[in-house]
Amino acid sequence: MPELPEVQSFANALDAQYAGKRLARIVFHRPDLRFPFPRLSLERIFRPGARFESASRVGKQLLLTTNVGAVRVSLGMSGAFFPASAHERRKHEHVTLHFDDGAALGFEDPRRFGFWVVEDAHAAPSEVGFAAAVQLSHDAADGTDSEGLRCVFLSSKVTGSRRSVKDVLMDQRLVAGVGNIYALEALFRVGVHPATPCTRVPRVKWESLALEVPKLLETAIAHGGSSISTYRRLHGDEGGFQTLHLVYGREGAPCLAPKCHGVVVRMVQGGRGSFFCPCCQRLRR
DNA sequence: ACATGAGCCTGTGGGC
DNA sequence: TGCCCACAGGCTCATG
């Protein structure tokens, strides 16, 4: 998906454009994404006359709040919001929120890996019971609390794990918000090979990661996120951070570290592509 | 308890 | 032009 910076970009844009508007209706164009929509609860939260209060971000998920309740939206790999047309819908537009001033907000998701979950104690058990309620943990972009991130990284659960460092960085139960791209970018910036077992990552590198991860994410947010293939911001323009990737998507290209003559390599880790510089990021086993 | 891999979907781009 | 394959931002489950 859209990782943390891309989700933050949506949250900022949605909040700026829709907060304060009143709902006219919610329309579903199919019954489910990865899971069935909690339709009854969503129709209540976005009922006619409800006031759209805010859009914010939790980990890699969006939190949409009205005066009635709140819903968490995971964008999966290909989910996105866009200003919808009242008359025609996009091929993969699955939900449309109509406002009483005529504005409309569409949600599209071609791969349908996304999901909507109700954040509401009043929802029917059948609507909150499914497994999508990921327990999110420490927010990776909380730059005001690098101490908190440092504690997570230096905990025995992390430093004692034989899992790869990249795998752990992407574990939303430990750190919320880091995905494939930003895990790899952060590891390059601190000079750690993505396949290094956590037990072999030196303490000083964990401390560097605790500083580097929030800094990287903040920078990416400031650039509107990374546009890889289909990701676009609310109004269709591309994010700008992909031009600042140092390793992601740069297989075969020269390493950008000063005085390094290495070449960026791609390997497969857990079925997903990993990019790194074998000179700057030596593997310790 | 942990690590690994398959599966969920559609679209795109490269090679032939 | 068209076909086939590899691959893509995430997350959950079954299996060893």
Image: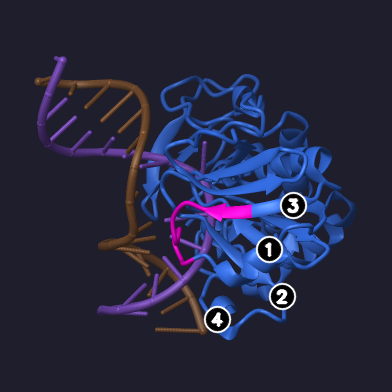
Chain colours: A blue, B brown, C purple
Whether residue A27 sits left or right of residue A60 in the image: it is left
Crowding at mark 2 (Cα within 10 Å: few <14, some 14-19, many 20+)? some
What whole-number distance in Å separates the C-alpha atoms at marks 3 and 1?
A: 15 Å
What whole-number distance in Å separates the C-alpha atoms at marks 2 and 4?
A: 12 Å
First in residue order: circle 4 vs circle 3: 3
Which amino acid, by three-letter code, is at mark 2? Answer: Asp
The residue wearing badge 1 is A71
The residue wearing badge 4 is A129
Residue at screen point 73% across, 45% down: A99
**Per the image, is A27 magenta?**
yes
Crowding at mark 1 (Cα within 10 Å: few <14, some 14-19, many 20+)? many
What whole-number distance in Å separates the C-alpha atoms at marks 4 and 3?
A: 27 Å
Looking at the magenta stretch, what is its main secondary structure? Answer: loop
> Of residues A272 and A107, which is closer to you in this image?
A107
The residue wearing badge 3 is A23
The residue wearing badge 2 is A120
* Residues in magenta, as a range: A26-36
Discs 3 and 1 carry the same chain letter: yes
Residue A213 horizontal/vertical position (percent): 72, 47
First in residue order: circle 1 vs circle 2: 1
Q: State if disc 2 and disc 1 touch (CB < 8 Å).
A: yes
* Chain that bears disc 1: A
Whether residue A199 sits left or right of residue A190 in the image: it is left
* Chain that bears disc 4: A
Instruction: Give SS at disc 1.
Output: strand
Whether residue A216 is visible here, answered yes or no, is no
Residue A73 horizontal/vertical position (percent): 62, 57
**Per the image, is A266 magenta?**
no
Tell me the mark number nearer the camera, choosing from 4 and 3: 3
Residue A54 horizontal/vertical position (percent): 82, 52
